[in-house]
Image: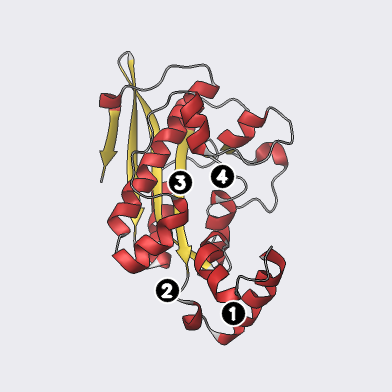
Amino acid sequence: MNPSLAQILVIDIETIRCTATYNELPDRLQKQWEKKAFLLSKSEEITPDELYMERAGIYSEFGQIIAIAVGFYVKQEEDLHFRVRTLSNDNEKELLLEFINLLNKFDQTKTFLCGHNGKEFDFPYLSRRMLVNGIQLPLILDLGSKKPWEVNHIDTMELWKFGDRKNYTSLDLLAAIFDIPSSKSDIDGSQVSQVYYEGNGLERIAEYCARDVVVTAQLLLKLKGLHLIEEQNIHFVN
């Protein structure tokens, strides 16, 4: 599997806990979270509601997607350009349908999705939330009948592992060692729920998401032994 850059869509998602507070969670889900919290908690001092506020957004059963950034490489004359479109919406179902409409503009039999830790997080999270919202999976995310070599997914973290069993390696760390300009955001992934619920910060979160897609795209180039895209050749489009 060695797709050309023109076949690759680089994506990133931002997720939040599905309710602002633990008490707003339906009783049935509260009971399920208590079971999960018991398994997750490494300290008896942290309560299920505190753990919910900190970590629920990373679990698709207790979270939701509020932003999806999609970027693609474009060759113009001798220069490589990168275009990023960011989708954001308070309504998750509308957001996911808009993302599928975007995917449908590409030939999904030849297109590859790329993300950092995408195989572990972004791609399955998207798929699960689509099913929860009653949305049919697009071809590129529907893995049910596919053999491993038929799955058009690229994961920059997996590429960095080179087959070893290394633990999680952050995008920020790899950006630092490859001297890739950072996302220059005033927030990080652990703060997204707080920014959304306390600061009405959907626009800030969408911008952060878009910047992470750029960093991931640049990292993929480095992992392929290619030069970074010049800043003036990175375009944020509507």
Question: What residue appears at the point 46 percent right and 38 percent down from the top-left corner?
Answer: 10
Q: Marks 1/3: CA distance?
A: 27 Å
Point out the tag, 1 or 3, that comes first from the N-terminus. 3
Mark 2: secondary structure: loop
Report crowding for label 3: few under 14, some 14 to 19, many 20 or more residues within 10 A (C-alpha).
many
Screen quadrant of the N terminus: top right
Point out the tag, 2 or 3, that comes first from the N-terminus. 3
Between 195 and 77, the one lying in front of the other is 195
Q: Are marks 2 and 3 in contact (CB under 8 Å)?
A: no
Q: Are marks 1 and 3 in contact (CB under 8 Å)?
A: no
Report crowding for label 4: few under 14, some 14 to 19, many 20 or more residues within 10 A (C-alpha).
many
The residue at which mark 3 appears reads as 12
Q: Where is residue 36 in the image (x, y as percent from the top left)?
A: 67, 70
Question: Based on the displayed image, in which of its 4 quarters is residue 147 positioned?
Answer: top right
Point out the tag, 1 or 2, that comes first from the N-terminus. 2
Q: Which of marks 1 and 2 is in front?
A: 2
The residue at which mark 1 appears reads as 29
Amino acid type at image mark 3: Asp
Question: What residue appears at the point 54 percent right and 71 percent down from the top-left corner?
Answer: 50
Amino acid type at image mark 1: Leu
Q: Marks 2/3: CA distance?
A: 22 Å
Question: What residue appears at the point 72 percent right and 67 percent down from the top-left corner?
Answer: 39
Report crowding for label 2: few under 14, some 14 to 19, many 20 or more residues within 10 A (C-alpha).
some
Compared across the picture, whether 97 is left or right of 235 comes to right
